[in-house]
Image (spheres, rainbow, N blue to C red):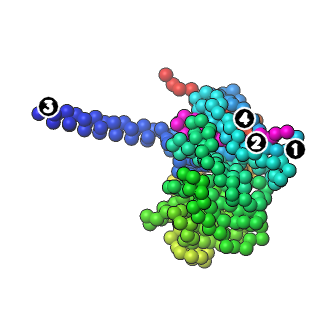
Amino acid sequence: MGGRANRWDWVTVLLIMAVVIGGLVSFGFAADWYQFRGPTADGQAGMARLPLTWSRTENIVWRQEIPGKGWSSPVVAQGRIYLTTAVPKGTNEDQSLRALCLDGTTGKVLWDVEVFHQDGSTAPRIHAKNSHASPTPVVDNDQLFVHFGHMGTACLDARTGQRLWAQQGLRYQPVHGNGGSPVLVGQHLIYCMDGADVQQVVALDRRTGAIAWRTPRQVRAKKPFSFCTPTLITVNGRSQVICPGSDVVMALDPATGKELWRVRYDGYSVVPRPVFAHGLVFVSSGYDVPVLYAIRPDGRGDVTHTHVAWMTRKGVPRNASPLVVGDYLYLAADDGLVSCLEARTGRLVWSERLGRAFSASPIHAAGRLYFCDEEGVTFVLKAGNNYEELARNRLQERILASPAVDGNALILRTEKAVYRIAEPVQP
């Protein structure tokens, strides 16, 4: 009798623990922000209670200056913040391509290591809005994957910064620098490689850095360079990795690299990461005149004329990724225009001109939308079909990196520093 009673006591305890944990999750204790645009790869921070207002002095938990220059977005895992930067060396424009780890609570730099050295005499010219350290890292368990485009990819020990492996055999000619970030899918680290000479999607074995597969674009784009980050989706129980590039978006099998479908368009220098919602993949075609495509991803082969549900040219971003919250799709364009559309139909609901220009991708938390413009102003809007501005927050430092979230704190990277921004904990 005693043993049976104890058994039911343990069952009761486990049930209570499940309810408590479920409650914590529902109230905003989100997963680690371990990759570009967060755990769901689309800017969703759940019910995190992010601050509404801040300034250079208000609600700033800490500010940590970062050496050099880099526009990789910060990522967060197990209470630590990771990012990359490029530090000039000497007088010949050499660059030390580095990875850093910060303590999430204090901002203290825990380690700062050189991953690769870039020779200034052979380094390509970069765009004024780019850096030599723009791709965002990915962290999983105790492994940190950092990517520097044509300079190579490496896996580091996330605890110490020790380099575990490096892959520098995939060279190509970048235009305006590098930008696309990698994504982890099972045992593969997948990224787009779109330069002036080579355009393909590559998968590395996450354990060794060896090439697992390569899939060429097979398109003759006049301007073949792009900077996009793949997006993993699941359709009818099957995984697809969506990989936009110049003049084409491809869906690949992440295990083999086999092409599943493609949609053709006119565009190059594609930056925005696709998002998937309501059974549609939303893709921006990039420069010069961006078009947003809503694509049904259940086709096979070339589905350009059969699976585009709708498209629009109004207020489409060239740099910031789209954001879907509920039934609505939000866009932040390069001219400062923010728009709300019906996600299923593309019908324009509202549009307002806010900042000077948007390059950072927006995020959503607990019914609030956060848009960071290039001047360092973050606009907080109420999610929904009516335009309602809740706050404008100025840091007076340039922002091109996308925000990250750590619990109820907003992590912003400016041109000079990383900020932890949060409201005081109520007693």
Q: Amino acid at mark 4?
A: Ile
Q: What residue is shown with label 3?
A: 2
Q: Earlier in the sequence, mark 4 or mark 3?
A: 3
Q: Is residue 87 magenta?
A: yes
User: Which residue occupies 44% across, 66% down?
Assistant: 236
Q: How would you classify the magenta stretch by its main secondary structure?
A: strand
Q: Residue at x 44, y 40 (%)?
A: 25
Q: Is residue 71 left or right of residue 250?
A: right
The amino acid on which the numbered mark 1 sits, given as a three-letter code, is Asn
User: Residue type at mark 2?
Assistant: Ser
Task: Give the answer, above or below, for where 338 lies relative to 254.
Answer: above
Secondary structure type for disc 4: loop
The image quadrant of residue 149 is bottom right
Q: Which mark is residue 92?
A: 1
Packing grade of label 4 (10 A; few <14, some 14-19, many >=20) is some
Classify 103 as above or below 237: above
341 within the magenta span: no
> Residue 272, position in %: x, y?
66, 57
Q: Quadrant of residue 390?
A: top right
The residue beneath circle 2 is 96
Residue type marked 3 = Gly
Q: Which residues are magenta?
A: 77-90
Image-based side of 230 in relation to 114, left or right: left
- In the picture, measured across the screen, residue 139 lies left or right of residue 174, that is left
The reply to whether callout 3 and callout 2 are in contact (CB within 8 Å) is no
Tell me what residue is drawn at x 39 percent, y 38 percent.
21
Q: Is residue 147 visible?
A: yes
Q: Quick one: SS at disc 1?
A: loop
Is residue 324 something that shows in the picture?
A: no
- Marks 1,4: beta carbons within 8 A: no
